[in-house]
Amino acid sequence: MVKLEIEPHSGGRLCVCMCVSGVSSCQCVAYLNPVACKAHVDLNHNHTCVLTQAIVLSAYLEMGAVELRGCSAVELGAGTGLVGIVAALLGAHVTITDQKVALEFLKSNVQANLPPHIQPKAVVKELTWGQNLRSFLPAEFDLILGADIIYLEETFTDLLQTLEYLCSDHSVILLACRIRYERDNNFLAMLERQFTVSKVHYDPGKDVHIYKAQRKNQREDL
């Protein structure tokens, strides 16, 4: 289980700490905003963890690379919901999605980490890629976020179908991932058939890439 705790942090910076129960290691990343986000991770047979990709994508959003105030965003395969929570803190209206089994956990993290006046900007909703898409409006979101969601080759077709359904002509997709296997490059090649794809950020210390994708034949002005 992962519990996210947001609290004031000295120095006016946002800090994400990943503490693994029973392991004497702690990973910290400092951001710009005067908030702190701590993730305490207790490992068990069915644990979830704050993945490095989510931390890097959250940091990228904090850098102001995308205008989030008033933006309609969705996080796919949210896990702990860290990216969606950070996006909401930065002013976006966010739908945080995952499979049904993860929803109660996501809701508890949102309630624990967003101030009451911001909580209405974050909605937790079930989404299994390629399924129940009609519970969302087509082309509903300005921004689609995903961290470490490119890992199971059998999900690639459903993920692409979901991206195509949710995207409008002006939507931007941001995917944070590690390129570890040939299948990762295979997904990017599949994505490039329908979208213009570019690498917009690389964190060499964590070996995480962030890719931006937009529908082809559109302006890339976000």
Image (cartoon, grey):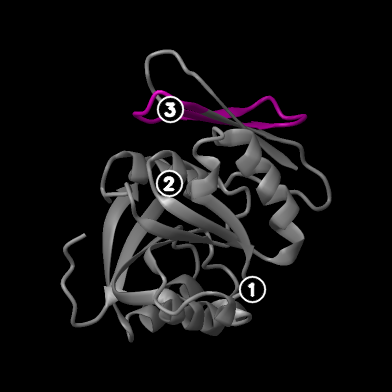
Residue 152 spot, x, y in % from top left: 60, 73
Residue 159 spot, x, y in % from top left: 52, 77
Farthest right residue? 45
Q: Which residues are magenta?
A: 15-36
Distance of mark 1 from mark 2, alpha carbons?
Answer: 21 Å
Please determine whether, in this image, residue 43 is positioned above or below residue 177.
above
State yes or no: residue 35 in magenta.
Answer: yes
Residue 14 spot, x, y in % from top left: 43, 27
Residue pointed to by mark 1: 128
- Inspect the image, locate mark 3, and give the three-letter code of the amino acid beneath it: Leu
Dots 3, 1 in contact, CB < 8 A: no
- Inspect the image, locate mark 2, and give the three-letter code of the amino acid beneath it: Ala
Write the residue at 19% across / 77% down: 218
Distance of mark 2 from mark 3, alpha carbons?
Answer: 13 Å
Instruction: Tell me the crowding category of disc 3: few under 14, some 14 to 19, or many 20 or more residues within 10 angstroms, Cα based.
Output: many
Which badge, 3 or 1, is on the more N-terminal residue? 3
Image quarter of the N terminus? top right
Residue 117 spot, x, y in % from top left: 51, 36
Dots 1, 2 in contact, CB < 8 A: no
Instruction: Tell me the crowding category of disc 1: few under 14, some 14 to 19, or many 20 or more residues within 10 angstroms, Cα based.
Output: some
Residue pointed to by mark 2: 87
- Inspect the image, locate mark 1, and give the three-letter code of the amino acid beneath it: Thr
Please determine whether, in this image, residue 40 is positioned above or below residue 82.
above
